[in-house]
């Protein structure tokens, strides 16, 4: 006899833009985000018995995403996502969890003639600020993150001492290019209520800035022995400077740049210490992941 093992539903890819107009200064501030909101609860009969009386339509969920963006600040995204998730618990007794994911797209203020422009912005990269909220009747859990921050260092990275056997063709290296697309997350201790999130809400921006700075400074300055070791050093530091974080996670592709032997052409030296022209690889790539928590 089959039974519904798990179920959630809602609206995905809801694009939202909000502007704040400072009437005194004339300065406008914009936020653009993509939202996913999925509900869980006593909704089994909608799947098993065609009972739509338990279904809050995904169209209504989409409307709620817009309405909550009107009613509440959308920045920091942790606060907006929590208000949105909590709404479904407060409004519908049969809903037990709301899973909200917010991806914030970059609109960086233009500097024109050395001055910040009051209402013009540009996309300075595909890096995203991300938030995943699970609002339940036991509290609100939040995982914040950075995604798609592409970085490269042209030296200061080695990889040697790894397993060598009949499957190994990779040469050891003491100097290589290191490049990755940073996917970093930091999970907060569970917040009991929205009030606990609102109290000291600046913690979220401070943590994002710290995580971003630590990621880039460690990437740049570490004499990297491996992706594994460098990412662990990032995790350690974020745990230290964000006291309310519980688990730090990284998922880093190792985007390979291969040397090209050009000796066949006029005897050009282009390998080892003479390497200048490389072939960036689209794939396959290494993929290195870890999560680090407090012991
Ligand atoms: O930093 C690295 N870690 C690995 O596990 C690995 N494996 C590999 O082929 N190159 C690398 N580089």
Image: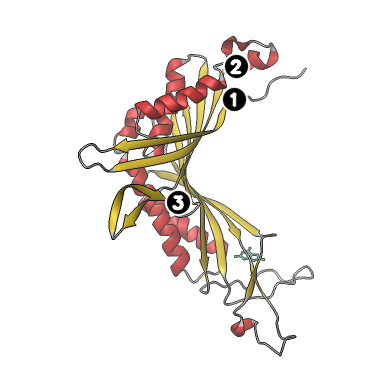
User: Residues under labels 3 and 2: Cα distance?
Assistant: 41 Å
Residue 25 percent location from the top left of the image = 21, 42
Q: Which residue is mark 2?
A: 43
Q: Earlier in the sequence, mark 1 or mark 3?
A: 1
Is 93 rendered above or below residue 223? above
**Is disc 2's CB within 8 Å of ligand 1?**
no
The Cα atoms of the two marked residues, 1 and 3, are separated by 32 Å
Mark 2 / mark 1, whichever is N-terminal: 1
The residue under the point 44% across, 56% down is 236
Question: Does 176 sit above or below residue 238?
Answer: below
> Farthest residue in the front direction?
113
Mark drawn on residue 9 = 1
Structural crowding at the residue carrying mark 1, measured as other residues with C-alpha within 10 Å and reported as few (<14), some (14–19) or many (≥20): some
Under circle 2, the secondary element is loop
State the SS at label 1: strand
Task: State the residue at coordinates (51%, 23%).
Answer: 61
Question: Residue 40 vs residue 50: left or right?
Answer: left
Which quarter of the rendered image does ligand 1 occupy? bottom right
**Residue 193 appears in the rendering:** no
Q: Badge 3: how crowded within 10 Å, few (<14), some, or many (20+)?
A: few
The CA span between labels 2 and 1 is 10 Å
Which residue bears the numbered disc 3?
A: 123
> Who's the residue at 30% across and 51% down the image?
117
Which residue is rendered at x = 78% and y = 67% of the image?
Answer: 167
Identify the image quadrant of the N terminus. top right
Q: Which mark is residue 17?
A: none
* Residue 263 relative to residue 177: left or right: right
Asked whether disc 2 touches disc 1, contact meaning CB atoms under 8 Å apart, the reply is yes
């Amino acid at each position: 006899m089959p039974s519904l093992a798990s179920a959630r539903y809602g609206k995905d890819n809801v694009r939202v833009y909000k502007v704040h107009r400072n009437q005194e200064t004339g300065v406008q501030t914009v936020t653009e985000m993509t939202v996913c909101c999925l509900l869980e609860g006593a909704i089994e009969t909608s799947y098993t018995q065609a009972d739509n009386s338990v279904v809050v339509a995904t169209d209504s969920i989409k409307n709620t995403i817009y309405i909550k963006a009107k009613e509440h600040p959308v920045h920091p995204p942790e606060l907006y996502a929590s208000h949105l998730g909590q709404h479904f618990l407060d409004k519908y007794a049969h809903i037990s969890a709301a899973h909200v994911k917010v991806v914030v797209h970059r609109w960086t203020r233009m500097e024109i003639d050395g001055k910040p422009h009051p209402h013009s912005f540009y996309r300075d990269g595909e890096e995203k600020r991300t938030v995943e909220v699970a609002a339940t009747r036991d509290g609100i859990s939040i995982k914040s993150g950075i995604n798609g921050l592409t970085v490269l260092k042209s030296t200061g990275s080695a990889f040697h001492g790894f397993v060598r056997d009949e499957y190994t063709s990779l040469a050891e290296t003491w100097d290589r290019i290191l490049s990755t697309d940073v996917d970093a997350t930091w999970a907060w201790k569970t917040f009991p209520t929205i009030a606990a999130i609102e109290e000291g809400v600046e913690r979220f921006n401070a943590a994002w800035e710290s995580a971003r700075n630590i990621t880039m400074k460690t990437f740049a300055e570490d004499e990297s022995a491996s992706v594994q070791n460098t990412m662990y050093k990032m995790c350690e530091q974020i745990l230290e400077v964000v006291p309310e974080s519980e688990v730090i996670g990284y998922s880093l592709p190792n985007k390979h740049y291969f040397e090209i032997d050009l000796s066949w052409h006029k005897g050009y030296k282009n390998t080892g210490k003479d390497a200048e022209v490389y072939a960036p690889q689209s794939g396959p790539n290494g993929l290195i992941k870890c999560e680090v928590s407090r012991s």
